[in-house]
Amino acid sequence: MWRVLLLSSLAVAAVAAQEKQLEADVSDIDEDVALDEEELEVLMAEEEEEEATVMDEDHYDETVDTASGKAGKAEMDANVSFQVTYKTPVPTGDVYFAETFDDGTLDSWQLSKTVKGDADDDIAKYDGKWAVEQLKENKVPGDQGLVLKSRAKHHAISAMLNKPFVFKDEPLVIQYEVNFQNGIDCGGAYIKLLTDTGNLNLEQFHDRTPYTLMFGPDKCGEDYKLHFIFRHQNPLNKDMEEKHAKRADVDLKKFYTDKKTHLYTLVLNPDNSYEMLIDQSSVSRGSLLHDVVPPVNPAKEIDDPNDSKPEDWDEKAKIPDPEATKPDDWDEDAPAKIDDPDALKPEGWLDDEPDFVADSTAEKPEDWDEEMDGEWEAPQVPNPACETAPGCGEWKRPQINNPQYKGKWKAPLVDNPNYQGVWKPRKIDNPDYFEDLQPFRMAPFKAVGLELWSMTSDIYFDNFIITSHKEVADRWASDSWGLKKLVASANEPGIFAQLMTAAEERPWLWVIYILTVGLPIGLAVLFCWPKKSDDDYVYKKVDPARADVEEEDEEDEEEQEAAAADEEDKAAEATHGAAAAG
């Protein structure tokens, strides 16, 4: 019964949580946006105009007024059960780059016309297709994004910023959306911020085009990554070195497999701190000075490459005891196994019978050539005489462990009085040492690019923004990604559908479901089924004797009737006698 109550409570809680999901999503979006009171009032007023309403229609006609140029006109979509009024987001502050793709074109973007340098000729071209489309699922009517359409091809596309970003005293905030609509087998969805080299040509954008930093998701096999790589210039030799931020602190798998739109954000601060966020939740943070590999600043001291270990250096912590001697009774020649002296040959053992005999039914093949194949011999088969016997052939005693066996004697180990520890080369000053305390001051960049290879198609990108103000990026997210989140939540399947989907992916869950549901039902039937009355039970148990009891009852009734008849006769006679006497 407690299992039934527990299951019912879980079902009620799941339904209640699902009904409150939309309200929670709205409140989450509002809480994520750090605005002052005046900005919050403006935001609430605009959100009232853009308030989402649930529609009951099963089918909607998609209408987009592209001729008028008004982005974000309300649309009806057949796959959307949660209808929203969408308006193309507009940055609320100063930005270096912002792109929504809602105009349906790639006019501000440049496809690469070059080839990849280190690839075979047949796949070296950047001939992967790009398109501007709506999401396949959980569409927001009027919202479009950039979609990588080809699989197993190189893709390269880029766009210029409104103005170059120079690393000085302002933070850098990079944010965009990704949806792996078909999942992801092997490929990336990261972006590159292309360095302002003075001669940057987007038509020649390829894998070796200089970039300042790279950020975004990447996956191959079961390795799920969120890249943050920046290029740092060595002040001594002027070489550029890639520095990789530490791995995310959370499991990233769900972001690649749930086919939902996720928001990726990178925040770099002038104090050299950084933070990576997914869906506005922090997944990794650290310092450019301490949490990247290899480190920005090399070690101040290094091992002397010319130093070598002295020949008499003793690194052995333990040595055999030089004073130990082998005991007199130690027999190193004793075997590890001996014949069991207590074993007896089983009765009926056939010593003279071999285990295998020639097959008497075999015949030499007609094409057998003894000059070429040698003398023909019948194949061996198990001896039929041994089938009923405990064994055939020479009987040997089984082997057992020798109780006298001790093995080769070795002296016990003792501490080495001459132990000097593990040798290490001496330290010297690193001739390549430098100290850069401001790795945030990277090379300026002036373009954003996607240079990708993927084994999966239909990777969706949307709502790029590059700014110096986190609150601007947050507001941009609430007007774009926030609506996608609301629609996805509204279209989330019920608890029963989720359980069925989980069971399709993991068939062993059916056992859990059957036990969880069937066991309480079985117990309820066992303890709550109506029982037979005690009388019926006794009747069944004494059924043979009851017939005798009934016969006896009938005899008693007949005797009682006969006795009553006799008494009536006697009374009649007495009455008659009295009358005669009178």
Image (tube, helix red, strand yellow):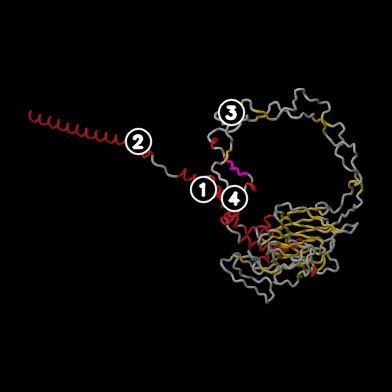
Q: Give the residues drawn in magenta, as a range.
A: 375-381
Residue 380: x and y in percent read: 59, 41
Separation of residues labelled 2 and 4 (CA atoms): 85 Å
Numbered circle sitting on residue 345: 3
- Describe residue 38's horizontal placement relative to residue 235 as left or right: left
Nearest to the observer: residue 35 or residue 267: 267
Of callouts 4 and 1, which one flags the residue occurring earlier in the amino acid sequence? 4
Give the quarter of the figure containing the C terminus: top left
Residue position marked by numbered label 1 in the rendering = 518
Of callouts 1 and 3, which one flags the residue occurring earlier in the amino acid sequence? 3
Q: Nearer the viewer, mark 3 or mark 2?
A: 3
Q: Main secondary structure of the magenta part?
A: loop
Residue position marked by numbered label 2 in the rendering = 542
Tag 2 secondary structure: loop
Tag 4 secondary structure: loop
517 above or below 83?
above
- Describe residue 224's horizontal placement relative to residue 577 as left or right: right
Kindly identify the amino acid type of the residue bearing the numbered disc 4: Asp
Residue position marked by numbered label 4 in the rendering = 367
**Number of marks in the rendered image:** 4
Q: Residue at x 87, y 58 (%)?
A: 239
